[in-house]
Amino acid sequence: NVGKLHFKDLLPVNPNGEENTRIFLSKLNEILTDFVRDTSDRNEKVLHFKFPEDMRASLDLDLADGPVDLQQLLDDCHVTLKNQVKTGHPRFFNQLSCGLDLISMAGEWLTATANTNMFTYEIAPVFILMEYVVLERMRQIIGWKGGDSILAPGGSVSNLYAFLAARHKMFPQYKEKGLTSVPGQLVMFTSDQCHYSVKSCASVCGLGTDNCVEVPSDERGRMIPSELERLIVERKSKGHIPFFVNATSGTTVLGAFDPINDIADICEKYNCWLHIDAAWGGGLLLSKKYRHPRFTGVERADSVTWNPHKLMGALLQCSTIHFKDEGLLLSCNQMSADYLFMPDKLYDVSYDTGDKVIQCGRHNDIFKLWLQWRSKGNDGFETLMDHLMGLSEYMVERMKQMPDKFYLCLPEPECVNVSFWYIPTRLRNMPHGPEREQILGKICPILKGRMMQEGTIMVGYQPDDRRPNFFRNIISNGACRKEDVDFLLAEFDRLGHD
Ligand code: ABU
């Protein structure tokens, strides 16, 4: 009966606590495995929505002066998961990162158990070597020999690393001398569909968001290269220094892929660093069928962000940033902290990767990816990518068969983002145009509200600069099947037909 036990009855506080520890962890394992079972069960809801005040009232979150017993802690774990949205449910279509890859999850459990920091080889020897192997493989897939990479806490920080490296390459004095070493106003360029973190780089790094120039995109959300060139020339004529271009491979909302080769030509002409934000679309590098034309020319980039926690289904979080140039990351970020990165250690200290990054403590995000990659092999990832893309194509095809009920914003999406409006019965005879779009935009939050209270599916919505609210459906869960897509479409009709 663990109700009589407390944390001090467990290992390592109690050296004789092995039996108690085994009982406690096996009970915890049951709770976690029940959650995995419910997440995989199509008869289970995706969520049991409660308003924040009701959720707060239903929970005991207080932190008391004294300890609670182990049974209470297990009950807390149970209640926490009971109220958690099942992001691995095959009918959760709300986010770019979803699914519950069991092997990657097992890797995360091991990672938590090992509880190490990734700054030095001396405390994470196997994990550091795994990083080396996996990141080298990813660079080879991009098409580079050599280079360098690191895992970062999310795509936004990966993009920031690219920015820092680009500035360091052009103005190596910046590291010591700061702003005074830059002879003029630096300017960066990105499409108007890019992830907001690109603009955030301009703010964080002292350019100011006015100097992150938004390049217009075409009707499918892809950067227009001639507009990029026009805007570079315009800024140069003002005496500014264009130095960084971000091309997005898989935009967050529409899933658009910017034309890399055309953009690379312009970067070469104007001596700009080419970064590719493939945080979202990067997984498609693994598919022979879908890699081209989306990634044609990717090897010409100077840096690439690629998040395995998105299309590849690694558990959150797992974001990588890759550089073609080998020594740049270290030269840019190295601070040589005496207490961590002593040069006279007994091993080759180039394995102390912590001095390449701007954070000190670094979470171990590699083991879950390495284990998952071992479990699937390259072929397994390729099959996964083709499965996700095939299902998205199936969804588009089914919607096209029901043009009275579904209006696709993009008839031929390039990724697994399917953007659309659901048309309730009363609007089906109204010609499609700005007036109907305004009404449909107001319907999105209402329909999403019904969806969440019903708990059977979850799909996100948002406006963009061309449209009022529309739904963005994401299929990036390997457990999703055609029957889930059919269910999703029927559920839209059930919840929204009036
Ligand atoms: N970092 C982009 C994630 C956004 C999304 O899941 O919708």
Image (tube, helix red, strand yellow):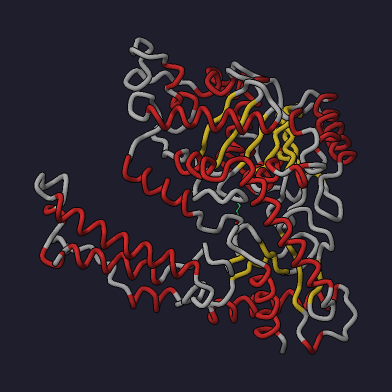
Classify residue 347 by image quadrant: top left
Query: Horizontally, is 27 left or right of 35 in the view?
Result: left
Query: Horizontally, is 216 left or right of 378 in the view?
Result: right
Quadrant of the image for the N terminus?
A: bottom left
Q: Position of residue 288 (x, y in %)?
A: 75, 42
Classify residue 302 by image quadrant: top right
Quadrant of the image for the C terminus?
A: bottom right
What residue is rendered at 31% in x and 59% in y? 29
Of 120 and 165, nearer the camera is 120
Query: Horizontally, is 109 left or right of 25 in the view?
Result: right
Q: Position of residue 131 (x, y in %)?
A: 49, 31
What residue is rendered at 85% in x and 29% in y? 265
Q: Position of residue 204 (x, y in %)?
A: 57, 38
Q: Position of residue 338 (x, y in %)?
A: 34, 17
Instruction: Tell which residue pokes out farthest to the top in this image.
Output: 344
Tally of marks: 0
User: Quarter of the picture for ligand 1?
Assistant: bottom right
